[in-house]
Amino acid sequence: MDNTFNFMKTFLAMGELTENKNTTIADKVKYKQRIVFATMKSLIPHWEAPSDWDKISDEDKLKRLIQIEKTI
């Protein structure tokens, strides 16, 4: 499991390295969400996104994704 999280962190870091001045919050969320959600689904087959995920702002989504990144 540690290897999976290490790969996730690596891909998240690579995404930050490829950001430019035109990268929007929505772009960041989309990238991080794809990686974090795929990682969670690979570890927990019936995992689902938080129930309020589609209702919160991209700013709040990004804060949550960054917190996950820092925690792992």
Image (spheres, helix red, strand yellow):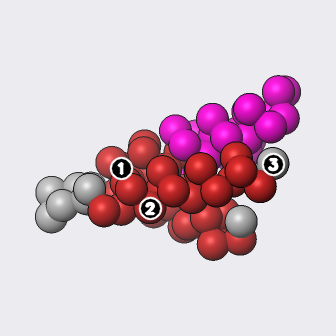
Range shown magenta: 34-56
Which label was assigned to residue 26?
1
The answer to which image quadrant residue 25 occupies is: bottom left
Is disc 1 surrounded by few (<14), some (14 to 19) or many (20+) residues within 10 Å? some
Q: Earlier in the sequence, mark 1 or mark 3?
A: 3
x then y, percent, for residue 39: 67, 40
Quadrant placement of the C terminus: bottom right
Disc 1 marks which amino acid? Ala
Snapshot quadrant of residue 45? top right
Q: Amino acid at mark 2?
A: Ala
Residue for point 39% across, 56% down: 14
Which residue is painted at 73% across and 33% down in the image? 41
Q: Give the Cα distance between marks 3 and 2.
A: 19 Å
- Is 51 or 7 nearer to us in this picture? 7
In the figure, 67 relative to 30: above or below? Answer: below
Q: Would residue 4 appear left or right of 33 to someone viewing this image?
A: right
Q: Residues within 10 Å of mark 2 (few under 14, many from 20)?
A: few
Q: Is 10 colored magenta in this rendering? A: no
Q: How far apart are the two marked residues, 1 and 2, measured between alpha carbons?
A: 17 Å
Residue named by callout 2: 13
The answer, for residue 39, to whether it is visible in the render is: yes
Amino acid bearing label 3: Met
- Would you say residue 48 is visible in this rendering? no
The residue that label 3 is drawn on is: 1
Q: Is residue 66 positioned above or below 4 on the image? A: below
Q: Is residue 29 left or right of residue 8?
A: left
Q: Nearer the viewer, mark 1 or mark 2?
A: 2
In the image: residue 33, left or right of residue 16: right
Dot 3 falls on a residue whose secondary structure is: loop
Nearer the observer, disc 1 or disc 3? 3
Of marks 1 and 2, which one's residue comes earlier in the chain? 2
- SS type, badge 2: helix
